Amino acid sequence: MNLLLSLSDAELMETADLTDAEYDELESQLALRAACLGWTGNPMRQPVETVAAIVRNIIRKRLL
């Protein structure tokens, strides 16, 4: 699990295996961020750095 946190953003996105609930959380967080920023595009198409940061936080919650 800790190894996932040390991967590059691109590697993390290819490797992370989120549960359905975790994926729902990811979608919710991306939609909220998009709304706050006035993002007019698809919330799921945000920069990989942004998505990876949210995924890392979700993975950290697993470790608690």
Image (cartoon, rainbow, N blue to C red):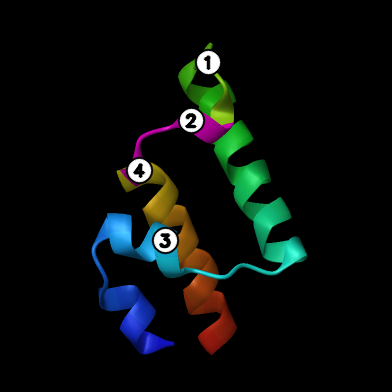
Rendered residue at 30%/55% (across/down):
10
**Front one among 58 and 36:** 58
Q: Secondary structure at mark 2?
A: helix
Looking at the rendering, the stretch of residues picked out in magenta corresponds to 44-48
Q: Which numbered tag is attached to residue 48?
A: 4
Circles 4 and 3 in contact, beta carbons < 8 Å: no
Measure the alpha-carbon separation of dots 2 and 4: 8 Å
Mark with earlier residue (1, 3): 3
Rendered residue at 62%/33% (across/down):
31
* Residue marked by disc 2: 45
For the residue marked with disc 1, what is the amino acid?
Gly
Q: Nearer the viewer, mark 3 or mark 2?
A: 3
Occupied quadrant, residue 4: bottom left
The C terminus sits in image quarter: bottom right
When the figure is inspected, residue 26 is found, relative to residue 2, above or below; the finding is above
For the residue marked with disc 3, what is the amino acid?
Glu
When the figure is inspected, residue 51 is found, relative to residue 60, above or below; the finding is above
* Residue marked by disc 1: 41
